[in-house]
Image (tube, rainbow, N blue to C red):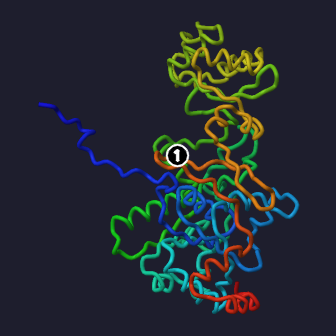
Amino acid sequence: MPTTSTSDTAPRRAAPDMRSGPLAGVRILDMATVVAAPFACTLCADLGAEVVKLELPDGSDALRTLAPVKGRHALYWKVTNRGKRGITLDVRKAEGRALLLRLLPQFDVLVENFRTGTLERWGLDLATLQRANPQLTVLRLTGFGQTGPYAARPGFARIFEAMSGFAHLTGEADGRPQHMNYPLGDMVAGLFGAFSIAAAVADRRAHPRECGREIDLSATEAMLRMLEPLAAEFEQLGQVRCRAGSRATYTAPSNIYRTKDRCWITLVASSEPTFRRLCQAMGRPALASDPRFGSSRQRMLHIDALDGAIERWCATLACAELAQVLEQHEVPFGKVYAIDDVLADPHLQARQAIIRLPDPDLGEVPAPCAVPRFSGFAPQIPRSGPALGEHNEQVFGALGLGADELACLRSAQVI
């Protein structure tokens, strides 16, 4: 009698629409500004959500002028708001507020990042929003959250990085704390924002009759969440982790080293088998049996001597030579890339990690691909961020507003 395998009896998915992502059918109204919360919405758009970007009619969103700018075109805007339709609406005015409430039944999620209490002052408190759409989820991304003594403070990425403890870890051991030349705090908050939206969507699908959620996302707490063991390290061991340059102080060896031709590589050989392979690659197999380096803990205690040996060895080889030796011995490493190296890398090219967004002003704009990749989903390449009010007629027309009404609203600077 033939047997039936588990795979034969398992439920099968219908043949997927390769253009339909896992968030297809989710509609998001993005009324946030600058980077963090809009980035959250863009990540959702990458995976199939329909996102409408709402701006004030004066185009005062700081991202429209934030560097890098080519001529009058803000490149940051074009890539961070890719794949969205764009409308203008002054929700501070009575007509704009009424129009927003008419829009809300069309959306599953509203995303905002104004200072705590701002929407309430405009007459758009949570109860009012959810009277318009009882199932609306509202993501509120602020610097410090909706409660607490800092709730009303303004926030920027560097503030989140500093107050979470992240900047305390960045820099040379004998130097001052440092920020990187990029708003990492905003991007981390955006990642948590996208995760929050996806969680709310899952919750809605599991409990379709429940009221919508309010999501209180603090960007400082998002950064702090990334520093997972530090509080336990301090409480249980009395240790405050500090700056150590590029050297890891929790495992060894793990550092950045310079090659003979003045390239930089990052190298990690902290497990025992990997460390032995590194010693073989260096032509110094005896280092693996040196009692100073016999375990990760011992290597950390004698890290200056070990790092010095690795540093001197790396300085004897050009980057290509060093890469060949490390690959042969299966030692994890990577050249420290600048963006031109990223664009030239054959692996990233093969995976199309950089895509080209169609753009009406510049022809095309390069940007990172959608992450992660889902089987059965081949996302269409999105267009770059919308022009100011580009889709007003389309979005407001769907509410039944005709050309004359839109002209009046435009004249009154409501849209």
Residue 206, quarter of the rendered image: bottom left
Residue 321: percent from left, percent from top: 73, 16
Residue in the picture at 33% in, 69% down: 207
Q: Secondary structure at mark 1?
A: loop
Above or below, 149 against 91 in this view is: above
Quarter occupied by residue 93: bottom right
Amino acid type of the residue that numbered disc 1 sits on in the rendered structure: Arg
Looking at the picture, tell me which residue is in the foreground, 20 or 262: 20
**Above-or-below relation of 162 to 8:** below
Q: Nearer the viewer, residue 27 or 216?
A: 27
Quadrant including the C terminus:
bottom right
The residue closer to the viewer here, 110 or 213, is 110
Instruction: Tell me the residue at 52%/53% (across/down).
Output: 225
Answer few, some or many: residues within 10 Å of disc 1's Cα (few below 14, many 20 plus, some between 14 and 19).
few
**Residue placed furthest toward the right:** 71
Image coords of residue 31 (percent x, y): 62, 73
Q: Compared with residue 276, is residue 332 higher up or lower down, i.e. above or below?
A: below
Q: Is residue 185 above or below residue 413?
A: above
Q: Residue at x 73, y 62 (%)?
A: 77
- Whole-percent x, y for residue 235 in the image: 48, 47
**Residue on which disc 1 sits:** 373
> Can you say which quadrant of the picture contains the N terminus?
top left
